[in-house]
Amino acid sequence: MKAAIINVTGYAGSELARILHGHPDVEVASVTGRSAAGKRLPEVLPHLWRLDLPITRTVDDSVDVVFSALPSGASAAALAPFVDEGVKAVDIAADFRLRDPAEFARSYGTAHPAPHLLEKAVYGLSEIHRQPIRQTDLVANPGCFPVAALLAMAPAVHGGLVRDDVVVDAKSGISGAGRGGLNTDVKDHFAEANENVVAYGLGGHGHRPEIAQELAGLRDADTARVTFVPHRVPMTRGIMATCYAPLRDEGVDEETVRDAYRDFYAHEPFVRVTDDPPQTKQTAGSNTCLVHPTVDERAGRLVVVGCIDNLVKGAAGQAVQNMNLMLGLREQDGLDRLPLYP
Amino acid sequence: MKAAIINVTGYAGSELARILHGHPDVEVASVTGRSAAGKRLPEVLPHLWRLDLPITRTVDDSVDVVFSALPSGASAAALAPFVDEGVKAVDIAADFRLRDPAEFARSYGTAHPAPHLLEKAVYGLSEIHRQPIRQTDLVANPGCFPVAALLAMAPAVHGGLVRDDVVVDAKSGISGAGRGGLNTDVKDHFAEANENVVAYGLGGHGHRPEIAQELAGLRDADTARVTFVPHRVPMTRGIMATCYAPLRDEGVDEETVRDAYRDFYAHEPFVRVTDDPPQTKQTAGSNTCLVHPTVDERAGRLVVVGCIDNLVKGAAGQAVQNMNLMLGLREQDGLDRLPLYP
Amino acid sequence: MKAAIINVTGYAGSELARILHGHPDVEVASVTGRSAAGKRLPEVLPHLWRLDLPITRTVDDSVDVVFSALPSGASAAALAPFVDEGVKAVDIAADFRLRDPAEFARSYGTAHPAPHLLEKAVYGLSEIHRQPIRQTDLVANPGCFPVAALLAMAPAVHGGLVRDDVVVDAKSGISGAGRGGLNTDVKDHFAEANENVVAYGLGGHGHRPEIAQELAGLRDADTARVTFVPHRVPMTRGIMATCYAPLRDEGVDEETVRDAYRDFYAHEPFVRVTDDPPQTKQTAGSNTCLVHPTVDERAGRLVVVGCIDNLVKGAAGQAVQNMNLMLGLREQDGLDRLPLYP
Amino acid sequence: MKAAIINVTGYAGSELARILHGHPDVEVASVTGRSAAGKRLPEVLPHLWRLDLPITRTVDDSVDVVFSALPSGASAAALAPFVDEGVKAVDIAADFRLRDPAEFARSYGTAHPAPHLLEKAVYGLSEIHRQPIRQTDLVANPGCFPVAALLAMAPAVHGGLVRDDVVVDAKSGISGAGRGGLNTDVKDHFAEANENVVAYGLGGHGHRPEIAQELAGLRDADTARVTFVPHRVPMTRGIMATCYAPLRDEGVDEETVRDAYRDFYAHEPFVRVTDDPPQTKQTAGSNTCLVHPTVDERAGRLVVVGCIDNLVKGAAGQAVQNMNLMLGLREQDGLDRLPLYP
């Protein structure tokens, strides 16, 4: 089967190329770029030297699946023609994640670019929406923070273990800020980002309504009470989401909670419930999500740590997992390599 | 005036030596070590080359003030003789921080080494206990995480803005783990700690009861409901404590809260309430604490970010600030240099 | 086919496990450890969770190939019985690299542990000794620095482009220091190694005679004049060797040199001659060596930059490449994945 | 005395502000910026909160000394009026470093902006040109790499210990690339620079002729044969220059060389000849240069390691040292604080 990657030159796009290069059944047939159009892929991204394709302005081959790694707001328009033709489409941007176009407008500061496609789009967190993903032509790949936060909280929220009052304190590597073309923001300069922790999005972040929408869905509610604070930490890859919520029944002990988590994820190929506190480094380059639920008995609180590689399970790997589901392939295809450690 | 540093070879001890070297009125007269005794200080710590003192087994000079940077549990015994002789003593270890010796035993796994001195000891967070510090001979220098968390939450807790239900999610540089003598734990190996975030202390951390004791004191209560989760992030210095608490009055807006914080810290030389999210790097090498209170109106929650350099305001700088108060010197002496940025 | 890894718990050993896990024709059948014996592999190295083997004291299965990742000096004795039985053996330690046992004794401070096997051993830099590797039962996997330095200089030395006077200035990530069991040297502590560059081995380093032996061999000489200075830089993986040598004919221009390099490596699957200065990050997790020859015309000097991932092409990947040759498999098997970037 | 800083918002400028803030006799009276003009200094650089000055377009006060941290090529024009009025001027850019304007044009790609001032300018490496610096009104502050390389090689070249054939292999932290305004080059993005070593300037770098000019001067020659290769390593601050040169007399031993170095620097307040290999981290935030000469007896080669903080001894600290000399102050004023370690 053939795949196209729209906007291959950012971190999500190049990571998709890397992963698909190792996929047994899917071949990267076409890659597009904007300023880099006209060059060969390895001229711009030398690490992809085994994938010597031209970067074109538009998809120049007939493909079975198309991925868009364009910025949010620009992605929907690029994907719409493919969706109309029945080509499977995975949007790595935010354009189809929020079911409510008004919430999209509030969060991303622009009117929704293709509200007519929202009905078609399935939120692509495979562990939660596997069946609809298998049947749709358009998947909204989830945001990196929501993947970590939702996989950390899903068993507890779905199982009714906690009250509707969640704090998500997330720590992300700097690749999460994107590559930013030829110029990048001074906050991403090595000398500024190194040896530094920065909290941001305190006034609001587009991943908060996404987390809220899905947490609400897990308990069949319309809304969820969520505080979300992302932090930048001086590493390239990795997200840890530390999630806090009051236990509904304060007497529940840690072992009971952990068993519930193990049951919930018993058949998941990419989620591991760990007995020891997980480390983001244990996920580097892999599609794994590590989840570690604990109970602070004194405070009656559930504390769950979730770890992913933000560019893999938080972006390109999740996208390939969705593609595998959409194309009827084995879900782990191309995704079964071990993480790079140390 | 003359100062002695017991166990100068760890990070807190060497940082004390660095700061005191720039102090206008206090001279480092004696430094002790264990395995390094017999060497000159710059042989062990070449960056202290302008402080060419012998490392001795015990304090070998008559001094006005003594600092102990020994491990918790070993510090009290070393300081007791000085306290008995009326020498001012600052304990950078945890031995005198918890007023309840039973809580000390639970937290540090050993019986309290000098319960008879507990009454004498003052908890050395200068911004909260300035007057008693001025009058005591024995200061318990606070833990690094408690400094960041307490300065972040003190105005809100003292002012009754929040309910008694605080989550402290803290991120610390790796120097917080200590230097560890000639051998160090494999978890502190650069290759393991780099490109990694790790949550720890999920089953309990000695700084939690310390935070709880002081938060309770701020509202004249006996206990406080606190969940505390520290995280290791791949940088050398710096702590950020992101603190979450439900607002008592959900209608309070951010500006009101920020004004309350500005009033509370109006005359503090080392605490700055910031309008923008602070960065740990903005404190590197300095005794400053940056505090940034915000309100998540949707969730009715106070979110406060506190930043310090864990080795300065979180250890050696705070110790010098306490020394200045105890000796009747200007509180900023030796501590007014700007941070190193970038 | 079945493989055993002796001492799987260090960085070279665990990297071998990771790579072999993705090998199409070879299965890891047995892994050994010393202090970790008795545990399961993922208990000690959680990132290897898909490789749930017991760690045993000795190889507990009949295997086709055995790798030793023991420390130099201890490796030969562990491999000797396998070599005697005709099992293919790859020594990742230094025990069989130097043909002269007296040089081994000088460099590693201990008598050679198995001089009778030296005749059998082939120096395992596949690009230089491919045929003998195919025919031997015992390969001495090269040191990490020699791989980078030799691949950078081989075309020039073999082609007679430079005089016998080479300076190798190498920069290595900290994983090169090894994992060091439960305790590690304080110099490897994150707080010491981060934000730091350190030169070492100025009084002599075991990789110098190894580089000299092979450079001499490339020009059919007995000795080579080489200065080698390794440096530690604050990253986990990667080696860059910047090599300097006076041109024999000062009029030779860069394009001529580059053509000679391209010819030399024309059929090599893992060496790429680059037009742009290469970056260590472009090799992370992959078995590629990037080589960039330049000419400083003013000084009449060849300057060549060589980059590898020290744990892959500098250790475990090179070992698998050698195994493929020894077992008659395709040389790229298990080694064709793209690097992880960024 | 009063000082002005032209272009305070880059790394050299802000570092100057930090250092001068701690100077006993000089006060920062005026700071200028381009895009930041109109703001207060702490709005742009929050770590300078104790220096609450307006950023103006031009120097708005009468001052005794002016520093320019403008880019090379733009600096001379800004300083010329001050020089004409007899105000002491220190140029941190490259405009007055090369005595030959044709060499400047070749190296910096633009005609020399003020050739008439070249005669007046003194190359500001205090250890080599102390007397002329004391007597001039215009100092050309040296480049960061030349400071490290020249202090490493000066005793050997001046003492005739080596032949005229020097290789300088330098490793620099990323702050050396400059801050770059609001946008920075993608190569400086944390995700690209982290976990990476990159060689650059292989086709020529402006600091090479500067090193050559001064090495030639040290042996009263017109030219010097120098190969210079800078490398970027993933840290914020610090330069290590590892310098290689063939010994004139191959029999000279290391102790003789080290004694010659100790004699040469016997009275220098900021240069330390070390017995152990130095580390860049031992200079962080301080004006010290560490120099470690060694001999590779087998190859008959001198190998010298020089370490500085590129923003202090390599820029702003050296500038203050020069200012102290020009103004007749104590050379160490404002520069005697110990480095920040770890």
Image (tube, coloured by chain):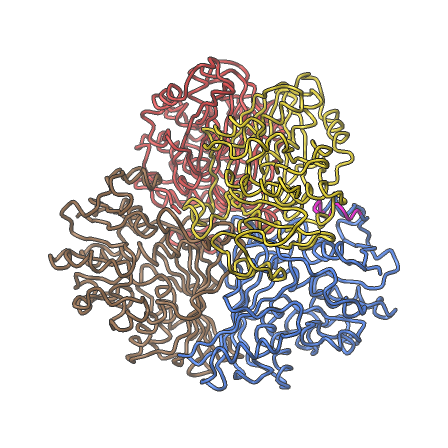
Chain colours: A blue, B brown, C yellow, D red
In the shown orientation, is residue A204 left or right of residue A131? Answer: left
Where residue A119 sits in the image (x, y, percent)? 77, 78
The residue nearer to you, when weighing C239 against B144, is C239
**Total of numbered circles in the picture?**
0
Q: Is residue A336 above or below residue A295?
A: above
> Which quadrant of the structure image shows residue D155?
top left
Q: Is residue B142 magenta?
A: no
Residue A243 showing in the rendered view: yes
Q: Give residue C287's position: percent from left, percent from top.
A: 67, 44
Relative to the observer, which residue lies in front, B301 or D293?
A: D293
Q: Is residue A49 magenta?
A: yes
The answer to whether A145 appears left or right of D316 in the picture is right
Quarter assignment of residue A149: bottom right
Main SS of the magenta segment? loop
Percent x, y for residue B249? 43, 83
Taking the view exactly as shown, the residue that stands out farthest to the front is C85
Q: Quadrant of residue D251?
A: top left
Indicate whether A72 appears above or below D204.
below
At x 39% / y 70%, what residue is drawn? B204
Q: Is residue B126 visible?
A: no
Image spot of residue D331 (x, y percent): 33, 32
Q: Furthest residue to the left?
A: B85
Q: Is residue D1 above or below residue D84?
A: below
Span highlighted in magenta in the image: A45-52
Camera-side residue of D37 and B178 = B178
